[in-house]
Every structure is written in C-alpha cells, then in structure tokens.
Image: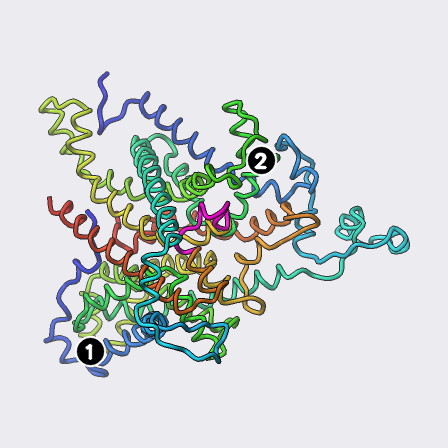
Amino acid sequence: MTDTAMGRVAEATPPGVARRIRGLSDRAIAWIFVAPTIFLLLAVNIFPLIWTIRLSFTNFRANRPNAEVESVGLRNYQRILTDADVWATMQATAHFLFWTLFFQVLLGFALAWLINRKFRHSDLWTTIIVLPMMLSPAVVGNFWTFLYQPQIGLFNYAVEFLTGVPATSFSMIGEVSLAPWAIVIVDTWMWTPFVMLICLAGLRSIPESIYEAAECDRASPWRQFWTITVPMVLPFLMLAVLFRGIENFKMFDLVVQLTGGGPGNTTTLTSIDLKREAFEKWRTGYSSAYAIVLFVTVFGLASIYVKALNKVKER
Amino acid sequence: MSFSITDPSPRQKAVAGALVIAYALITMLPLIWIVSTGFKSSADSIAYPPKIAFEPSLEGYVNLFTAQTRQTPEYLAENPPQTWYEEIVHEKGMVIAGPSRFGERFLNSVIIGFGSTFLSVFLGTLAAYAFSRYRIPLKDDLLFFILSTRMMPPIAVAIPIFLMFRNLGLSDTHLGMILLYTAVNLSLSVWLLKGFIDEIPREYEEAALIDGYTRFQAFRKVVLPQAATGIAATAIFCLIFSWNEYAFAVLLTSGTAQTAPPFIPTIIGVGGQDWPAVAAGATLFLLPVMVFTILLRKHLLRGITFGAVRK
C-alpha cells in the first residue's frame, strides 16, 4: 500500500541504550543534523515568502529600486481577482490541467494494465516508455516546436500520413483553436509514464489470492475488474493525479518553450502570465500578490484533495 | 479458454505486448528525431517530406561548438580549410571565428548540477537520519513543511529570490544557483533518504553502540554504508532535477552562470533556429539523463513520488 514515510516512523531510540553512550547527546546530534536543512529552507523559502507577502501590499517595482515605495493596501489583490486577463489565464490553466490529467490517467492506467500482463521483456519496454519524463522540459519543448512545423514537421507529416489532412494546412502552435491542444499533447507524451508507473505499483500490490477467491465465486473478469482492480488501484491513481496536478498547475518551462503563451493569450498559463508581470512589466508588487494568490490556490486545492485521498484509502 | 486477470493466456500476453511496444515506439519517435536531426545537414533537416534516410553530416555538431562569420569568396579561396570541421564551415561560405558558448554553458550545468547534488545529499542525509532515528519536537510538521516547499510555483519564489540575490551579489553566480538548487532539492532528498534509512534495522546501530562506538561513529560506519544505494539513487534524482531546471535558470542567470537548458533554445543560425545544431546540443544534453534513467529504473517509482510509493 502507499505508505508515507511519516506513518512509518517508529519510536525513538530506547532511552536506556542512549544514556550510556559517550560523546554528544542524542538531542545535540539531532539538532546539528537537522539545523542546516531547516536553515537553508527558511532562507530560500520562508524568508522570500514573507518578503513576497510584504511586497504584495506595495507598488514596488524591481526595475526602479530608488523610486519611493508606497503602501497600497489590498488594491493589488482586488485588481487580480477582478482582472479579466487573470481569469482568462486561470481558464487556460484549467483546460490544460483537466485534459492532461484526463489523457494521462486514461493512457497511463491502460498501459500499466497491459504491462501487468507480464509479457516477455516487459521491463525493457517499460524503461523505454519512461524516458521522456526524465528529460529537460525546456529542451524537449523547444524541439517539439520543430516537430510541429507545418511544412517540415514530423508531427504534421504523421497526421497527413494517417488522416490525409494536408500537413501544410494547419499549424499546431500557430492557431488559436489548436495551440491549447498542442501543449496538452506534449505534456501527455511526457508525463503519461509517470501515471503508468504509479498505477503499475498499484496493480502489483493487489494480492492474487483476492482474484482467485473471486474466480472461485465465479465472478466474471469484468466484475473482478470493477470490484477488485479499480478500487484497489484508486488510491494510487489519486496520488498520481495529485502529483501531476500540482506540477501542471505550476507549469512553465515546457509551455513557455513550446508556444510562449501564444497565439494571443490562448496558452498563457498562470505561471507564464506571472513571469510577464514580474520580469517583463516589472510590476513587482502586483505580481507578488499574484504569486500569493496562486500559492494559496495550490495549497488550498491540494489540502482538500489530500483529505479526499485519505478517505479513499480508509475504505 | 476464458479470460483471467491473474493468469494471462499466451494470446493475451501477445496482444498486450504488441500494444505496449507500439506505444513505446511512438513515444520514442520524437527522441529518435532529435538524435537523427543532429546528424542531418541543414538542407536535409528541413526537407519535405521529412527525411528518414539521409547522408549523415556533422554540420550540426560543428555549428553547435563554433561561432562563425560569413566571408567573401576571395577570402575563402585564399584561406583553404585546414581541418575537416573547417571544411564543413567553408562549404557554406563561412569561417570559424572561435568556440561557441555551448561548451561553457554545458560546463555550468555540470558544475551547478554536481555542486547542488553534493550539498543537498549531504545535508539531506544528516537531516533524514535525525528524522528517522530521533524524537524531534514537531517532527511531522517539520517534514510537511519541508515537503510543502515544493508546492510553490518557481516563478512565484523567483521574485523575492531575484531581489535577494541582487542585494547579496549572488545574481548570475554559480554559488547562488548551487544554493538555490540545493534548497529546492532538499525536500526530495530528505524524504527519499528518510525512507531508505527507515528501512535499515536499528539493531545494527544499537549493537555498534554497545560495542563502544559513539553515536556519530555508528552513523558513519554502520548507517552510511547500509544506505549507500539509497544515497546514490537520491543523488541521481537531485542531479537530474538540477540538470533539467529551467525557470530559475532563465530568470536568475544570463551570462556567467547560465546553464544549458535556457541556452539550447537560443541557438540561432542564419534565418531562424539552426535545427541540426539545436538537436546536436539537445542530444548531448539529454543523453546523460537517459543513461541515468536506465541505471535508476529500480528506484524510479520511489524517486518520482518522494518515497510515497515504494513497491
């Protein structure tokens, strides 16, 4: 089963043994060992977070460090929540999230199920399938723009070959109606193996005896699939969706290289929009508030989801 | 023969195998295309229909590693090429003006990748050991805090880090990027290593303690050797992350400390992107990760789920 590291923590060292030891006390060692990590994370995560919160109430601009900084209260937040462009990027993100998760769950589960049929060399093919997800999204995303070229791209050529639609008649990353799907395709290509690996672990965790018992009871394979396989794999699948969901909510590198947010704003996901506000328009105060809104959203959605996940696990 | 979930028939295995292999081949196509485009001439790389059979050329690799300038035919005639790579460049009416920046950028990736991997695994091992073996107040909260640092979108953290680096003089420096990637990788390294160390039975250390080892000696001589595989797997995961990272690199580095991912997409030839050179750079950059992935395959699942699924 899934088994978080936290849950497995056994009780600490038996005090009887500990007391007899020479050298530093356990307590001192524990702190010496943990302190550098905590310190670094405070410096690189918490301190900047607090700084961001402070900046989010100001009109500070990082490209004008000498200009006077004024407090603007909640105005940045008000603007973000009422800005139509921000909602448009949220919608683009939601579209991207929904369809990438949909295809990755479908394909990932199907592949895991097939691999679990234990055909010859299945491990070798699994390793090959896994390769794309380990590669640099920026480098790979950039190369996909080449595959998507209308004239010379392999993708368009493959579409022409399979469906007869002329390769030159469409541009995956140049057309408003196609670009949102272009990024879904590449993300699905890249990350389906992630869902597949987790599902495979789920499938392999189901004891065969359960199926054998079901077969004795003459349950049909169809019924076995829906009453045994699906419920037992569900917690794994939900975990995969959690990981992919958080990652794709933050999505930046792959899409910025593929489409740069265009054409128009059709593939401007929130991270891309935030980057423009913060590092091109230099509206530091405004984009700090934007960052906080995003962080609260991810954190909020993730905690609701984790609650649901724990309920499924308990069943 | 009826369908069985636990005991697939040979026919079922064959069908499943064929479908998976078909998917694997399709999924490999873009990667095969990257590698093969690297060995195409510029003309072959933009041919329609896309060329599957072509005469291999090292033009892409030469363009990747050299900076070139156009010269007049007279100049070219007076200065015949000395080496095979100069010849490739000459045929296009250019001469080599010097090395390109690719070598530097690649080296930056290596320095920053290995530096941050070493630091995050070093600090992570210490913290993971303490979390695994000692009673630490608020342990669960601290562990969750460490994990939650991964939820923040990199662009969101980049704003204050950009300002902080500017004030500390860390912008566009190797040290700054190493510290940043170390902090990002620490969550993975602590969680993964804690899982690996939890699996080492405590009895070994206790026996060492009774034999007169100090706590620290027991950690070094008993726990570390036992955790070696886990530490190696964690290190590879950290290395792959730093190697692939793009968002922080593109925002916080521009020259001295720029790594390869922001650089490769900017390789421009005459009239647009020089695809063979881009593909050549991508091949050299992606290949080490492919090798590592194959080495890691037994620990892959654990690594990508922060140790949540161990199998």
Q: Give how far apart the Cα atoms at labels 2 and 1 are.
A: 65 Å
- In which quadrant of the rendered image does the N terminus of chain B lie? top left
| Mark 1 chain | A
| Quadrant hosting residue A115 | top left
The residue singled out by tag 1 in the image is A26
| Mark 2 chain | A
Q: How many marks?
A: 2
Q: Outermost residue toward the bottom?
A: A23
x and y percentages locating residue B172 in the rendered image:
52, 71
Is A99 located above or below residue A271 in the figure? above
| Quadrant hosting residue A221 | top left
Residue at image position (53%, 29%) is: A158
The residue singled out by tag 2 in the image is A150
Q: Nearer the viewer, residue A132 or A255?
A: A255
Q: How crowded is mark 1: few (under 14 residues within 10 Å), some or many (20 or more)?
A: many
Label whose residue precedes the other's in the sequence (2 or 1): 1
Q: Tell me: B76 left or right of B192.
A: right
Tag 1: amino acid: Asp
Q: Tell me: B299 left or right of B89.
A: left
Q: Main secondary structure of the magenta part?
A: loop
Q: Nearer the viewer, residue B126 or A34?
A: A34
Q: Which numbered mark, 2 or 1, is in the foreground of this view?
A: 2
- Magenta stretch: residue A262 in it? yes
Residue at image position (65%, 39%) is: B45
